[in-house]
Amino acid sequence: MKKKILTLAAALSIGIVSLAGCGEAAGTTKVDVTSAEPAATAEEIKTEIPETPSDTLGEDVQAIIDRGVLRVGVKNAVIGFGYEDPLTGAYSGLEISLAEALADKLGVPVEFTAVTAATRTELLDSGDIDCVLATFTITDERRESWDFTTPYYTDYVSVLVEDKNGIKTLEDLKGKIVGVSSGSTSAKALVKAMIDAGIIPGDGFDADSFDPATWTEGISFRQYDDYPTISTALSAGEVDAFCVDKSILAIYRTEGRSYIDAEFSPQEYGIATVKDSGMSAVAEELVTGYLSDGTIDKLISENGLD
Ligand code: GLU
């Protein structure tokens, strides 16, 4: 697993300065980046974050401060959200800026771990990462296992196809094989959209027990561990279509490929944290503060996501 440590100094050089400024405006922690002193204690942080909803920051937050680094799971190939420049190794995107701001709030540097839809929750559960900022859609089912902040972005699901195959609509997908990422919401979203459009009857559909591996009514799925592999499978004709959020599909929409004429199933992205942890409160405060002071809108437009 590839990990990168971004020091606060490096964060400053790639634009955290403006975020720190916005944080101040929102009444969040001001971090003295010139100080070589150890990170603040939870008591200090507590008094500097007046809006923190919980009384105490929690042992988990103190443990992160004591460790001296915030570990965040991010995507590394989703331009505008979480992208690692292959030449420089520098990360950029909306979710990267939010992760940096979160670390800044705690007065520690951030360490990025590249995650996929299949790995992000196990890394959070095992404690390898403290939170997930990785195009992670908030669902009721997921809320049972992890805390999510208020959404910071809403995307939609669509389907990418090879033009030469003549698939243009949801209807054309009938009987086809679709590549999806394991651990994603994509297959369920597509089946639901086809049922809603009256393309398949959906008698056997149950949202709680839906499994892409066994679904065969009108459409079937192949699951992959990562998106580059689905893209390759699409080129090779192993699958007829590639279904996921448009933010992710955009990278693979190369010459000779198009989206079908449909986008569906709003995907609200939130920061995921361990259930009932102190980090849940810290992350929520960051997102709500940045939503109300316009920072999220600014980051969305700076990253070309509007
Ligand atoms: N956003 C969707 C999900 O959380 C698509 C998968 C992904 O984020 O990689 O399931």
Image (cartoon, helix red, strand yellow):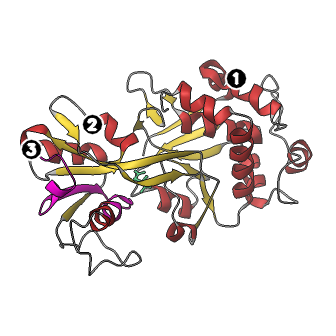
Q: Which callout, 2 or 3, points to the residue nearer the camera?
A: 3
How far apart in space, not on screen, are marks 2 and 3 (Cα)? 18 Å
In the image, farthest residue toward the top: 13
Question: What is the span of residues highlighted in magenta in the rendered image?
Answer: 165-189
Q: Which residue is mark 1?
A: 18
How far apart in space, not on screen, are marks 1 and 2 (Cα)? 31 Å
Q: Quadrant of residue 207?
A: bottom left
Q: Which residue is mark 3?
A: 166
Q: Secondary structure at mark 1?
A: helix
Q: Is mark 3 within 8 Å of ligand 1?
A: no
Measuring from the top left, give residue 163's x and y in whole percent.
12, 38
Label 1 Cα neighbours within 10 Å, binned few <14 / some 14-19 / many ≥20 = few
Q: Is residue 210 above or below residue 84?
A: below
Q: Find out whether residue 174 is within the magenta segment.
A: yes
Q: Secondary structure at mark 2?
A: helix
Q: Quadrant of residue 275?
A: bottom right
Q: Find out whether residue 219 is within the magenta segment.
A: no
How far apart in space, not on screen, are marks 3 and 1 (Cα)? 47 Å
Front residue of this view, candidates 232 and 300: 300
Picture residue at 62% right of the left edge, 53% below the top: 130
Front residue of this view, candidates 124 and 299: 299
Q: Which residue is mark 2?
A: 252
In the image, is 133 to the left or to the right of 46?
Answer: left
Q: Earlier in the sequence, mark 2 or mark 3?
A: 3
The amino acid beneath tag 2 is Tyr
